[in-house]
Amino acid sequence: MPQHKEQVMLMRNGSTPRATEPPTRKETEIMRNHIVLAFTLQVIEKKNIEVEMSSQTLKLLYSATTRLLAKIIREDLKEVKKILVEKNISLFEISKDDTAIYYRFVCRGHKDKLIITKEFVRAEVSAKIGSYIQSLVSILQKV
Protein backbone atom coordinates (compact mmCIF):
# COMPACT_ATOMS: atom_id res chain seq x y z
CA MET A 1 0.00 0.00 0.00
CA PRO A 2 1.24 3.55 -0.66
CA GLN A 3 1.17 4.51 3.04
CA HIS A 4 3.44 1.60 3.90
CA LYS A 5 5.88 2.40 1.10
CA GLU A 6 6.18 5.95 2.44
CA GLN A 7 6.94 4.66 5.94
CA VAL A 8 9.55 2.23 4.64
CA MET A 9 11.23 4.97 2.58
CA LEU A 10 11.30 7.31 5.58
CA MET A 11 12.87 4.59 7.73
CA ARG A 12 15.50 3.83 5.07
CA ASN A 13 16.42 7.51 4.87
CA GLY A 14 16.88 7.64 8.63
CA SER A 15 13.79 9.77 9.15
CA THR A 16 10.97 8.73 11.38
CA PRO A 17 7.38 9.20 10.34
CA ARG A 18 5.29 11.77 12.20
CA ALA A 19 3.20 8.87 13.48
CA THR A 20 2.94 9.92 17.10
CA GLU A 21 2.55 13.65 16.63
CA PRO A 22 -0.87 15.13 17.35
CA PRO A 23 -2.76 16.71 14.47
CA THR A 24 -1.79 20.19 13.40
CA ARG A 25 -4.19 23.08 13.84
CA LYS A 26 -5.05 22.85 10.13
CA GLU A 27 -5.76 19.10 10.40
CA THR A 28 -8.04 19.73 13.38
CA GLU A 29 -9.88 22.36 11.34
CA ILE A 30 -10.30 19.87 8.51
CA MET A 31 -11.84 17.36 10.94
CA ARG A 32 -14.19 20.04 12.31
CA ASN A 33 -15.12 21.11 8.79
CA HIS A 34 -15.97 17.51 7.91
CA ILE A 35 -18.24 17.24 10.94
CA VAL A 36 -19.96 20.58 10.27
CA LEU A 37 -20.46 19.82 6.56
CA ALA A 38 -22.03 16.46 7.40
CA PHE A 39 -24.52 18.13 9.75
CA THR A 40 -25.14 20.91 7.23
CA LEU A 41 -26.02 18.32 4.60
CA GLN A 42 -28.41 16.61 7.02
CA VAL A 43 -30.20 19.91 7.72
CA ILE A 44 -30.54 20.76 4.02
CA GLU A 45 -31.79 17.26 3.13
CA LYS A 46 -34.33 17.38 5.97
CA LYS A 47 -35.55 20.81 4.79
CA ASN A 48 -35.87 19.46 1.26
CA ILE A 49 -38.16 16.67 2.47
CA GLU A 50 -40.24 19.19 4.42
CA VAL A 51 -40.54 21.46 1.37
CA GLU A 52 -41.49 18.61 -0.95
CA MET A 53 -44.23 17.52 1.44
CA SER A 54 -45.59 21.03 1.87
CA SER A 55 -48.28 22.80 -0.10
CA GLN A 56 -46.33 26.02 -0.57
CA THR A 57 -46.87 27.98 -3.76
CA LEU A 58 -43.14 28.11 -4.54
CA LYS A 59 -42.58 24.49 -3.57
CA LEU A 60 -40.84 23.60 -6.85
CA LEU A 61 -38.40 26.53 -6.54
CA TYR A 62 -37.61 25.80 -2.89
CA SER A 63 -37.19 22.10 -3.57
CA ALA A 64 -34.89 22.69 -6.55
CA THR A 65 -32.84 25.14 -4.48
CA THR A 66 -32.41 22.77 -1.54
CA ARG A 67 -31.46 19.93 -3.89
CA LEU A 68 -28.85 22.18 -5.53
CA LEU A 69 -27.49 23.24 -2.13
CA ALA A 70 -27.31 19.59 -1.08
CA LYS A 71 -25.40 18.71 -4.25
CA ILE A 72 -22.86 21.49 -3.65
CA ILE A 73 -22.43 20.52 0.01
CA ARG A 74 -22.01 16.84 -0.97
CA GLU A 75 -19.22 17.84 -3.38
CA ASP A 76 -17.50 19.90 -0.67
CA LEU A 77 -17.87 17.06 1.82
CA LYS A 78 -16.35 14.67 -0.72
CA GLU A 79 -13.35 16.98 -1.10
CA VAL A 80 -12.87 17.20 2.66
CA LYS A 81 -13.08 13.39 2.95
CA LYS A 82 -10.44 13.13 0.23
CA ILE A 83 -8.14 15.44 2.21
CA LEU A 84 -8.69 13.36 5.35
CA VAL A 85 -7.72 10.20 3.46
CA GLU A 86 -4.66 11.89 1.95
CA LYS A 87 -3.55 13.04 5.40
CA ASN A 88 -4.20 9.57 6.85
CA ILE A 89 -6.89 10.79 9.26
CA SER A 90 -9.86 8.67 10.36
CA LEU A 91 -12.75 10.17 12.30
CA PHE A 92 -15.46 8.24 14.18
CA GLU A 93 -18.43 9.46 16.19
CA ILE A 94 -18.43 7.57 19.48
CA SER A 95 -21.25 9.18 21.46
CA LYS A 96 -23.33 12.27 22.10
CA ASP A 97 -25.17 13.81 24.98
CA ASP A 98 -27.32 16.89 25.52
CA THR A 99 -24.43 19.32 25.06
CA ALA A 100 -21.72 17.70 22.93
CA ILE A 101 -20.76 15.14 20.32
CA TYR A 102 -17.71 12.98 20.99
CA TYR A 103 -15.44 11.72 18.25
CA ARG A 104 -12.43 9.45 18.18
CA PHE A 105 -9.79 10.11 15.56
CA VAL A 106 -6.59 8.55 14.33
CA CYS A 107 -4.16 10.94 12.68
CA ARG A 108 -0.95 9.35 11.37
CA GLY A 109 -1.18 6.78 14.16
CA HIS A 110 -1.92 9.33 16.89
CA LYS A 111 -5.20 8.41 18.60
CA ASP A 112 -7.24 10.94 20.52
CA LYS A 113 -10.71 12.34 21.10
CA LEU A 114 -12.38 15.41 19.66
CA ILE A 115 -15.32 16.97 21.48
CA ILE A 116 -17.59 19.40 19.69
CA THR A 117 -20.41 21.20 21.46
CA LYS A 118 -23.83 21.10 19.86
CA GLU A 119 -23.99 24.89 20.23
CA PHE A 120 -20.83 25.21 18.12
CA VAL A 121 -22.26 22.84 15.49
CA ARG A 122 -25.54 24.79 15.32
CA ALA A 123 -23.73 28.09 14.91
CA GLU A 124 -21.36 26.71 12.26
CA VAL A 125 -24.15 24.97 10.33
CA SER A 126 -26.13 28.19 10.30
CA ALA A 127 -23.11 30.14 9.07
CA LYS A 128 -22.34 27.52 6.39
CA ILE A 129 -25.93 27.51 5.11
CA GLY A 130 -25.88 31.31 5.01
CA SER A 131 -22.63 31.25 3.06
CA TYR A 132 -23.91 28.67 0.56
CA ILE A 133 -27.14 30.59 0.06
CA GLN A 134 -25.27 33.86 -0.44
CA SER A 135 -23.05 32.22 -3.08
CA LEU A 136 -26.10 30.83 -4.88
CA VAL A 137 -27.92 34.17 -4.75
CA SER A 138 -24.93 36.05 -6.13
CA ILE A 139 -24.73 33.59 -9.05
CA LEU A 140 -28.44 34.02 -9.74
CA GLN A 141 -28.17 37.81 -9.63
CA LYS A 142 -25.55 37.71 -12.39
CA VAL A 143 -27.94 35.93 -14.74
Image: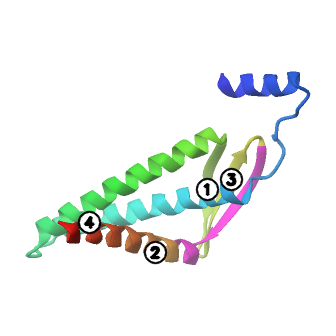
What residue does disc 4 label?
139
Q: Amino acid at mark 1?
A: Met
Spatial separation of the CA atoms under disc 4 and disc 3: 38 Å
Image position, residue 109 (x, y; %)? 77, 41
**Toward which corner of the image does residue 101 lie, by quadrant?**
bottom right
| Mark in front: 4 vs 3 | 4
Q: Which residues are magenta?
A: 110-121
The colour scheme used here is rainbow
Kindly indicate whether the residue at mark 4 contacts the one at mark 1 (C-beta within 8 angstroms).
Answer: no
Question: Earlier along the polypeptide chain: callout 2 or callout 1?
Answer: 1
**Residue at the farthest left position:** 57
- Residue under pointer 2: 127
Q: Main secondary structure of the magenta part?
A: strand
Question: Between 96 and 1, which is closer to the camera in this rendering?
Answer: 1
> What residue did someone put label 3 on?
104
The answer for how far apart the CA atoms under marks 1 and 4 are is 29 Å
